[in-house]
Amino acid sequence: MHFINGMVFVPLADVPNPAGLVPALAQLLDVTTGQNDPAQSLTHYLRNKEMLLVLDNFEHLAAAGSFLTKILAEAPHIKMLVTCREPLYLAAEWRLNLEGMPVPPDEADPTRIEAVQLFLQTARQVSPGYTPTPTELTYILTLCRAVGGMPLALKLAAARVRGVPVKELAAEVQHNLDSLATHMRDLPPRQRSVRAIFDYTWQLMDEEERKINTAMSVFRGGFTRQAARDVANADDLAIAGLVECGVVLVDRAAEESRYTLHRLAQQFGAEKLEARGQIGEMAGRHAEYFAELVGAQLPALASSQHRDAIHLLRREWDNVRRAWDTAIEQERFDLLEKMVVSIGIFTESGAFLHEGIQLYRRATDLLELSQNKQTHPRLLGMVWGWLGRLHYNISPESEGEQYYHQQLVLALETSDPLNKATALLGLAGFATDHNRWGEVITNSQAALEIFTELNHHRGRMEAMTMLGVSNAAHYTPDEAEKCYLQAVDIGRKTGNVRAYLHPLVNLGYLATDTGQYAKAKAYFQEADVLFEQTGTKKTGRLLYLRGRLAAFMGEYEDALHYFEQSRAVRVLEGSAFAVARTDRWLGRIHQLLGDVDTARQIIQRSLKVGMETEHPSSIEIALSHLGLTEEAAGNFALARKHFSEALDLSRELNRRGDVIFNIANLTRVLIQLGELDAIPAGLREGFAALNPATDPRGRSTYSRPMRHTALQLVKKNFPFRYWSLSCIIPSRRQKQSIE
């Protein structure tokens, strides 16, 4: 826009009071007032002008706002741009809220972000040629987010790069306002530090606004209007006032208006709260509010409202963590007990397994003290139970089993049936991964009886599911199906949608293993819908099982897609074993699609995990898959080496199904190498080992199409059409029969 008479910048920071506004304007515009009324002379001068007046820092002169209205009324071609920390509340006012420069979380090239560009521009003023490394750029991004994109804060921080590494700058800024200061003489005093800016804003507030502002500093990651009322005693008028002066930011795009303090304003408020000696009191009120909120979500988490509850907890997660830590610091066991179950369900559902473990471990530091162990055994048992459960979700080889043992001992000592049943069922889960099937059945049945007496629906479902797993392992698929269906039925009748996802997925697994592919697909599709409805993140296991099903149906591209998704989720879940298991399948699918080099690389990665974690079963299966890959590539000697090593391991582990599978693979390769003398003994050993009842887990590595006569003979003598699919897919390279 063009103004005939130009633009005039009017700095008002040094004008002491509203009475000084007219003289300051008259002086800048060179208006001589003489004996006339200065205000009248000024408006008369402006009447026929077309001009833009930029009035900077008007907040302390707000009482003179009526004079601006007078100018606009008498000089219709005058436009004004007024910077102010709070609205003027004038009819002619059009407001534009200025916030920090945006710092998007997913920009691939940080140098494209304007906040980063401003930082680099300023840094090069004090250190010409400054070029950050990629690692330093990540710290600059952290710093930009820590100051909320505030331009002044970015410039003050960048001015220090000559003497302070950006890594240290980023750390300082998050905890120390005084790190954002400068000695530049050409800046006004109140712009030489961020603290000065907040001090200036603080002086503009009345006492009630100051009190509320400091109280709000206890929030983390934002807050709702209701939370502000209950924790900070802030009514709607007070909140609106703090929003108007820019201390509180509002996100109106959210379903419910959500408020946040600027990150630096939060630091400033926390310092004021500490100076007033109120941090403990306000943190306690904050913890009480969010403990009630978290506890109130438990019924929804066990119903069709699961999705809404998960959404709420995810939105308030920073506040929930703060409340949990405060409850520990202040030894508020009542608050911990309100939150313990809901936090467990949330961290398990939302793939926050490691974070959940950290929260519970911090609680055990307090609860395991002898006096607390005696006075709060039930709470300690619940925390140990959730530690066991979350660890199991990460890896069956984790320390989770020990937590369940501790929970069981304590439950027996204190006659606590719920913790006893929880521990028994958890130990049954770990027993499944170590072939201790007698323990699985005994513990699951005992847990089921207790859960039934307590009318604990989720426990009953999980116990029935565990019994189904045991039946499946003992080659009684019909009994396994009955157990899973009973578990699903309990979930449907009680509305606990999330809890019956596990048995539903197991039904799909069972149908896949018994060759009922259409039925399996229907179960998995139903599970997909329920995951969506409940807002629960799809587990790596479901995606893995869908990949297996697609592979057995010959839909290799779909299988590849599912396994890649599964791997990504399992990396986030933090389970190295599950990632390695998925890698073996990924390698197998790549091999079937003709990409042997990629297959070899992926399976070797899986083998490395098994060796690093000293997990013999993982090593054995990876070696078998490497053998299949080398066989497909025509490297029969190398395939023989891998199959032989896998065979030795499977014998040591007494996994008879794996023994048969490895013998069959080795036999096939020996034929290719012309070493026929070794075959009969191998086949005889394989048939002698064929006794499913002696090794329930053996079914996990049987192969269905059995590519050659050796495998066809095994299939003929195998009494069930019930094999796992880790090697079910026929080779595209070799299809000849052996007579």
Image (cartoon, rainbow, N blue to C red):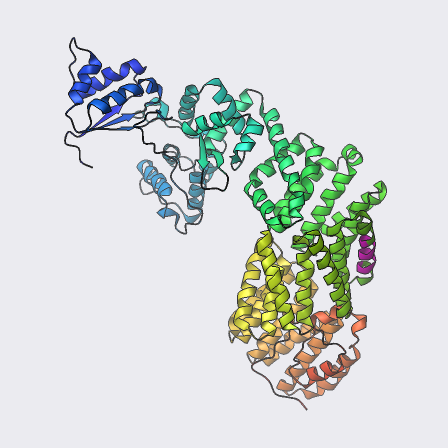
In the foreground, 681 or 27: 27
Q: Is residue 2 left or right of residue 87?
A: left
Q: Pick the residue in front: 236 or 201.
A: 236
Stretch in magenta: 440-448
161, 257: nearer the viewer: 257
Vertical side of 473 occupied by 164: above or below: above
Q: Position of residue 574 (x, y in %)?
A: 60, 53
Q: Is any atom of residue 504 visible in this view?
A: yes
Magenta span contains residue 445:
yes
- Per the picture, the main secondary structure of the magenta-coloured stretch is helix
Q: Is residue 282 above or below residue 37?
A: below
Query: Looking at this rendering, what residue extends furthest in the bottom direction?
Result: 739
Q: Quadrant of the N terminus?
A: top left
How far across and down, in percent of the image, does residue 65 sit?
31, 20
Residue 128 percent coordinates (x, y): 31, 40
238 falls in the magenta region:
no
Residue displayed at 29% across by 13% down: 19
Tell me if residue 368 comes above or below residue 724 in the rendering.
above
